[in-house]
């Protein structure tokens, strides 16, 4: 882009913004500041380009490049000059005071799942400088205050609570370990979904879950009618300690998967799945229990381990039958959270191994905050 007496954003910049999104912010900032400085000079001169008049204070005298060292590298601006007077545009100084925007742009690129290598290539192409992985880490750390405020914000009433965990590779003491990423999603009485909280830790499973759930209560979570989750032992114990009086709905999708481990022959798997679906879609609990008892009798000889497993476990997946029929579908599984976890995986696999827990928490928090805002702006569940 060449410098010229034009105070509108060049078409090629708008195209770049459309194509690259956040990746084009450094170049956008450079062009915007250059445009603002041009307008400021014209206001100082008192006449339009190539105009004559008694009010002209001075004459334009081209541009002087000014390279500014920022924490993302050197950025060169075109500072408008005048022939005689003492003119210096304030737009540049104001822009430099917003240098933090460069770092936030880098942080946003990282959050969007752009690797450090790609960040470096983009910045080098746009600004003629490179960025180290250490700088990207420092830039993303600027988001910490915003993300911490979001994670600790006050909560209110949520009728239904969904809990799940996934694992990310985190480096600790020279070894790569699995850190648990705990996520809670709630459905408000209005039907709106919200991401209520997230936590990342290498700590013992039950301790981590208990601290996480206690934190939700401390932040004001009330009115929970049903909790839906998998049967993870650490979660089960923590849930009983914190939400002991709240009914628990074991995820029916996970129950289907768990049941298949007890099916001794491949040719029985589809039949077992169909029998379980019939139980889960029963119109009421007595009907479901009758179907369950019939299923146990059906497989006592052909799949004895399955028949022994069914009564205690499948009953945990029938809590939803105590709800109004129109509300059951959205509460019977954690499939909504599974979709959230798939989106997290899509974005975090770019990183591979996180250098520490804090970096993992930063990224997943930013992604979940973004997702929750999208839900807020969208339709009810």
Image: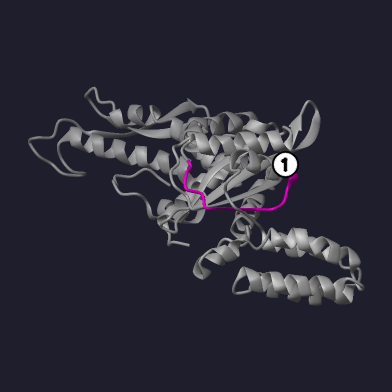
Outermost residue on the left side: it is: 54
Please report the residue visible at 79 percent of the width from the left and 35 percent of the height from the top.
176
Please report the residue visible at 51 percent of the width from the left and 49 percent of the height from the top.
224
Q: Is residue 346 left or right of residue 59?
A: right
In the picture of the structure, the residue carrying the numbered disc 1 is 234
Please report the residue visible at 55 percent of the width from the left and 34 percent of the height from the top.
140
Q: Is residue 137 left or right of residue 25?
A: right
On the question of residue 354 being in view, the answer is no
The boundaries of the magenta stretch are: 221-233
Q: Where residue 96 sits in the image (x, y, percent)?
A: 39, 28
Q: Which residue occupies the foreground of this view, 26 or 35?
A: 26
On the question of residue 203 being in view, the answer is yes
Q: Where residue 87 sits in the image (x, y, percent)?
A: 25, 25
Residue 288, quarter of picture = bottom right
Residue 12, quarter of picture = bottom left
Q: Is residue 29 left or right of residue 140?
A: left
Check residue 75 for magenta coloring. no
Q: Main secondary structure of the magenta part?
A: loop
Binning the other alpha carbons within 10 Å of mark 1 as few (below 14), some (14 to 19) or many (20 upward) gives some
Check residue 222 for magenta coloring. yes
Q: Which residue occupies the foreground of this view, 150 or 214?
A: 214
Q: Where residue 97 sits in the image (x, y, percent)?
A: 38, 27
Q: Secondary structure at mark 1?
A: helix
Q: Where residue 103 sits in the image (x, y, percent)?
A: 50, 33
Q: Is residue 357 left or right of residue 367?
A: right
Please report the residue visible at 52 percent of the width from the left and 48 percent of the height from the top.
195
Q: Which residue occupies the foreground of this view, 172 or 111?
A: 172
Across the whole image, how many numbered discs are drawn on residues? Answer: 1
């Amino acid at each position: 882009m060449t410098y010229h007496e034009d105070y509108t954003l060049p078409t090629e910049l708008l195209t770049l913004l459309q194509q690259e999104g956040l990746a084009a912010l450094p170049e956008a900032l450079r062009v915007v500041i250059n445009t603002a400085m041009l307008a400021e000079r014209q206001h100082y001169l008192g006449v339009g380009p190539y105009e004559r008049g008694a009010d002209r204070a001075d004459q334009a005298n081209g541009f002087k490049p000014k390279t500014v060292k920022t924490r993302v590298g050197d950025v060169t601006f075109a500072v408008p000059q005048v022939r005689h007077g003492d003119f210096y545009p304030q737009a540049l100084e104001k822009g430099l005071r917003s240098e933090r925007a460069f770092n936030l742009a880098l942080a946003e690129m990282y959050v969007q799942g752009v690797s450090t290598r790609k960040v470096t290539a983009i910045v080098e192409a746009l600004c003629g400088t490179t960025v180290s992985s250490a700088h990207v880490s420092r830039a993303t750390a600027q988001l910490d205050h915003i993300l911490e405020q979001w994670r600790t914000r006050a909560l209110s009433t949520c009728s239904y609570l969904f809990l799940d965990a996934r694992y990310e590779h985190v480096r600790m003491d020279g070894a790569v370990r699995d850190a648990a990423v705990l996520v809670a999603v709630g459905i408000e009485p209005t039907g709106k979904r919200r991401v209520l909280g997230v936590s990342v830790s290498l700590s013992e499973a039950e301790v981590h879950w208990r601290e996480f759930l206690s934190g939700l209560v401390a932040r004001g979570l009330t009115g929970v009618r049903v909790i839906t989750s998998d049967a993870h032992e650490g979660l089960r114990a923590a849930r009983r300690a914190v939400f002991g009086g709240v009914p628990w709905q074991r995820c029916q999708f996970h129950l289907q998967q768990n049941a298949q481990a007890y099916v001794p022959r491949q040719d029985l798997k589809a039949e077992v799945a169909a029998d379980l679906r019939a139980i889960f879609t029963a119109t009421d609990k007595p009907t479901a229990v009758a179907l369950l008892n019939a299923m146990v009798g059906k497989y006592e000889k052909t799949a004895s381990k399955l028949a022994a497993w069914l009564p205690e476990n499948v009953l945990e997946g029938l809590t939803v039958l105590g709800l109004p029929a129109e509300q059951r579908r959205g509460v019977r599984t954690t499939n909504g959270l599974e979709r959230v976890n798939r989106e997290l995986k899509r974005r975090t696999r770019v990183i591979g191994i996180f250098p520490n827990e804090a970096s993992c928490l930063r990224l997943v928090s930013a992604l979940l905050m973004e997702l929750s805002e999208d839900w807020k702006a969208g339709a009810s569940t």
